[in-house]
Amino acid sequence: MIVSHSWDIQTKLETSTAGVVAAKILSRSSHARITHVFDKSFYAEVGDQLICGLAEDFLNGPINICVNEIPRTLDEGTCIEISLAKAKIWEPKKLGPINANKLFKNLPETYRRDLIEAKSLMPKSLSSPLFRNIAQPALRDICLFLRDKQTAPVRAIKSLLGLGPGLTPSGDDFLIGMMLLLHTVGEKDLFRKLAEIVRDLAPPQTSSISNAHLSAMTDSAQANCLLHELLFALQEKKGIKQALIRAENFGHSSGKDAIAGIITALFALRQRHPPLNRKIMF
């Protein structure tokens, strides 16, 4: 974390869209310091919290802000001022009552077949022996918790946090997808229990960037817009293939990892509440 009490503002950015968490952070201070710069995005520290800036209309999310232009001169350590004066606050589309069995039924057959064989959808990025030997028992314990609502999976979540490759490690993205699904289908108690564990354990276990996204999920029950759009498509049974492709293509493996979390949670809930006339036996 970059710490400084002097501000030499070099750039002022106008925000067109801001997520609810980013807007809350920026309402306390408009001054930020750049911590990471990428091709079409950057992360900035506001106080002790991170927000993510992206080119306009690139991607919405709880800690994301969309700006008209990312200056080429932006570099790590640069002090900026961020204006919310013209910003629209982004929130995902509100859905009506969600049925977990319906969402599962609307998944493409390939996903359901993989679940039947493996009992959870292991992210491919965790399939190497180094990661798999840690991830498999953790996924099993979390699924048992979601199914039986018994011992909180503290050890399993700790094993997944920070596990795997990527700017946001695969285990973190998996947990974000799982928590998003639980909250969306109304399993608020399960969501809160997982969120409390993640909130307590994440900071020392994973990167500052990934922790910012995990924290946004535990606080707002929101993730990037592509995951919300996927859940909407599954609920409405419209544009599912396209929504899956868009979500899968997000990041190096982040989209796929989060989808694995969504589908594994659906599987665990289906085991707890199996449909009366099911064609697929688990």
Image (tube, rainbow, N blue to C red):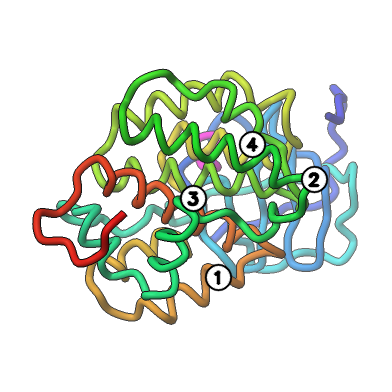
Tell me which numbered mark, 4 or 3, is placed earlier along the sequence.
4
In 3D space, how far apart are the residues under numbered discs 2 and 4 (Cα atoms)? 13 Å
Q: Is residue 144 above or below residue 62?
A: above
Q: Which residue is mark 3?
A: 261
Prevailing SS of the magenta stretch: helix
Which residue is labeled 1 in the image?
Answer: 57
Q: CA distance from mark 2 to mark 1?
A: 38 Å
Kindly tell me whether residue 282 is visible in this rendering.
yes
Q: Which residue is mark 4?
A: 160
Q: Is residue 78 left or right of residue 111?
A: right
Q: Which mark is residue 93?
A: none
Residue type at the position of mark 3: Gly
Identify the image quadrant of the N terminus: top right
* Pointer 2 with pointer 4, Cβ within 8 A: no
Circle nearer the viewer, 1 or 4: 4
Question: Badges 3 and 2: C-beta atoms under 8 Å apart?
Answer: no
Is the residue 147 above or below the residue 41 in the image?
above
